[in-house]
Amino acid sequence: MVFQSKIDKYYLYVLISAIVIIGIACVLPLFLDKQIDLFGIVCMLSILFLTVGFLLWISFSISYSFQDNHLVVKTGPFKKRIQYIEITSVRPTKNIFTGYRILSSKDAVAISYRSGLMGEIKISPRDMDAFLSELRGRVPALKENK
């Protein structure tokens, strides 16, 4: 079962702001440099399109899928597998700026697990109730902190 990430307005504003700043940083030099050549233009526009494309890819491809033995958290080229037997607890969180997070909404949950460097991942499934229900079914010893 695959769950997509919830995307809220706050995240979209941050994403659009980042794209505008990157766009200004890549395009403004083209207008300020009077002696820019075709190679410089191609390089700056390539950087712009590759960076914006990567940001959009990792922003809109966030998914959380339940496999037989593990939960897969994926965004763009990045993937994290968490074994069900490693998951200890889940709790709602509004603190989305710290820790290991693959989310696009302030409405998030933090899943604690025994392995890994951080030991916790913050995610924001679009259908939170269905996600938590599926997680409870796969992890019977799950502790839910409110």
Image (cartoon, grey):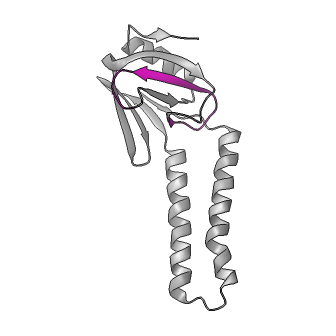
Q: In this rendering, does residue 129 appear at all?
A: no
Please check the rendered image and state whether residue 110 is part of the magenta-colored stretch, yes or no: yes
Q: Tell me where residue 114 appears, x and y as whole percent.
A: 35, 21
Q: In this rendering, does residue 12 appear at all?
A: yes
Please report the residue visible at 52 percent of the width from the left and 69 percent of the height from the top. 47
Please report the residue visible at 54 percent of the width from the left and 17 percent of the height from the top. 91
Quarter of the image where one finds residue 21 = bottom right
Q: Tell me where residue 98 appears, x and y as whole percent.
A: 55, 34
133 up-or-down from 47: above or below: above
Please report the residue visible at 62 percent of the width from the left and 34 percent of the height from the top. 105
Q: Magenta segment range? A: 101-117
Quarter of the image where one finds residue 139 = top left
Horizontal side of residue 52 vs 17, given as left or right: left
9 up-or-down from 93: above or below: below
Quarter of the image where one finds residue 113 = top left
Quarter that holds the N terminus: top left
Please report the residue visible at 41 percent of the width from the left and 26 percent of the height from the top. 119
